Image (cartoon, helix red, strand yellow):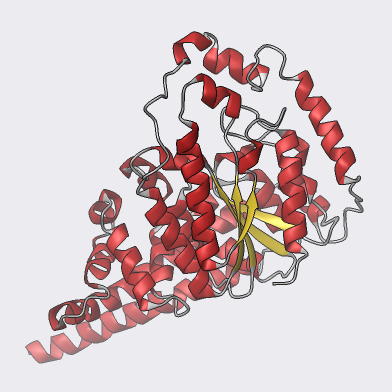
């Protein structure tokens, strides 16, 4: 009697297991059929955070040889008409960016973005911010706000990454409460992944089927969320961004730089630090309370460099062709707050050394700390800043690997 009941139960569980495994990729394929020309560019321009934790739209963007993914953080909210999504709308120089990231998308989060995809031979831009390196690495709260279990699974099951790289990432991810509390299956898989003892190998094998099912379920959620988002994107913007719908020729870079500088100059009149009037009035008001307030601050050492190294390992394993954008800080303001210059230089030097070790390209603006009108505030680029960044990135995109 027990055997008669057990067999149908086992078959039912197996059928359920196989159904979920099939439905994950099937749902992604079905929603991808709704992603028509112009959707990717429109989603990128609108910087929709709910899509950053998924994989579907980014994987579709990567299939277009003229789309260049850009990973970064809060600087993507600056630049006005010279923000890369706006400046390169319509592909006036033959390519368009796909921006992924917002405030809190630090190196470990970018490693998840990259590790969940196939970036072989793909040009990619990674924007670094000095303030990431000023504390004790990514915090538990920041990680929780930006973590994607789907991307973590995709990374672990990504055949292009070496087992050593994935093991290092697994050891890092299980340090966060978000993984332990809300994703026990993933936590179990990561805990035993890459260990050499027989017991760990057995436990990894035990967790594998459940991990595959959960990943497939997360793929379904990603497909539903992506469909909901693209369904509500403005139809006019999609039509405008459709390939060939915009006939735009960029002015000379020198003219854009001159125009952007003049525009920023009009908006930086109430302070000597090269900070926008609105930011200065709302966030600073009384500068004396900030004077010499950062004398004991530092950018080096920091755990963030280990996460940056993990990101670079992922890109190397995948065979990507990346460029790292080193944004400068606002020199006059950092000097006023007493932030040590040697600490800023240590950060710049360390990033340069790491990129050189992996033979990655650099868009190095570290010597531009004191350029007039380059910054909007203490750490974000202005319209002029983005013009300079855009010109360098455009040159990189058109270079042969």
Q: Quadrant of residue 195?
A: bottom left
Which residue appears at 46% of the width and 30% of the height?
A: 340
Report the residue that reaches farthest toward the left: 1
**Residue 356 location in percent, x, y?**
55, 62
- What's the residue at 31%, 65% (across, down)? 170
Q: Nearer the viewer, residue 230 or 292?
A: 292
Query: Of residues 124 and 287, which is closer to you in this image?
Result: 287
Please identify the residue farthest to the front as the structure is shown. Answer: 342
Whether 372 is drawn above or below 191: the answer is above
Residue 289: in sight, yes or no? yes
Q: Quadrant of the N terminus?
A: bottom left
Q: Can the viewer see residue 115 in this picture?
A: no
Q: Quadrant of residue 396?
A: bottom right
196 sits left or right of 290 in the view? left
Look at 74% across and 34% down and name the residue there: 383
Q: Quadrant of residue 159?
A: bottom left
Q: Is residue 1 shown above or below 74?
A: below
Q: Is residue 368 left or right of residue 93?
A: left
Expressed as whole percent of the image width and height from the top left, the position of residue 371 reads 70, 32
Q: How many marks?
A: 0
Please, is residue 182 above or below residue 159 in the view?
A: above
Image quarter of the C terminus: bottom right
Identify which residue is drawn at 76% across, 45% down. 86
Q: Position of residue 221 (x, y in %)?
A: 45, 60
Q: Position of residue 257 (x, y in %)?
A: 82, 37
């Amino acid at each position: 009697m027990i055997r008669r009941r057990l067999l149908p139960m086992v078959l039912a569980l197996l059928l359920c297991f196989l159904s979920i495994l099939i439905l994950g990729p099937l749902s992604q394929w079905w929603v991808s059929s709704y992603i028509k020309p112009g959707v990717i560019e429109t989603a990128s321009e609108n910087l929709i955070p709910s899509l950053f934790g998924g994989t579907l739209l980014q994987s579709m963007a990567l299939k277009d040889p003229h789309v260049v993914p850009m990973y970064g953080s809060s600087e993507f909210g600056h630049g006005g008409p010279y923000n890369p999504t706006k400046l390169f709308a319509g592909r006036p120089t033959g390519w368009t960016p796909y921006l992924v990231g917002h405030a809190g998308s630090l190196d470990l989060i970018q490693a998840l973005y990259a590790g969940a995809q196939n970036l072989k031979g793909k040009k990619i831009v990674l924007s670094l911010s000095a303030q990431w390196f000023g504390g004790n690495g990514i915090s538990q709260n920041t990680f929780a706000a930006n973590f994607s279990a789907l991307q973590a699974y995709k990374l672990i099951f990504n055949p292009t990454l070496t087992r050593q790289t994935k093991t290092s990432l697994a050891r890092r991810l299980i340090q966060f409460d978000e993984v332990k509390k809300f994703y026990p299956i993933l936590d179990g898989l990561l805990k035993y992944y890459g260990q050499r003892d027989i017991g760990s190998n057995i436990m990894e094998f035990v967790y594998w089927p459940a991990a595959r099912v959960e990943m497939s379920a997360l793929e379904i959620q990603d497909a539903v969320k992506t469909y909901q988002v693209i369904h509500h994107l403005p139809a006019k913007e999609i039509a405008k961004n459709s390939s060939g719908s915009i006939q735009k020729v960029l002015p000379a870079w020198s003219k854009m730089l001159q125009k952007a500088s003049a525009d920023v100059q009009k908006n930086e009149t109430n302070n000597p630090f090269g900070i926008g009037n609105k930011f200065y009035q709302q966030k600073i008001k009384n500068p004396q309370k900030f004077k010499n307030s950062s004398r004991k601050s530092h950018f080096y050492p920091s755990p963030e460099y280990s996460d940056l190294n993990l990101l670079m390992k992922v890109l190397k394993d995948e065979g990507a062709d990346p460029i790292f954008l080193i944004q400068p800080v606002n020199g006059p303001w950092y000097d006023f707050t007493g932030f040590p210059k040697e600490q800023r230089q240590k950060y710049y030097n360390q990033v340069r050394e790491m990129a050189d070790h992996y033979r990655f390209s650099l868009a190095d603006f570290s010597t531009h700390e004191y350029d007039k009108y380059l910054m909007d505030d203490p750490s974000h680029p202005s319209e002029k800043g983005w013009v300079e960044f855009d010109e360098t990135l455009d040159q990189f995109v058109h270079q042969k690997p």
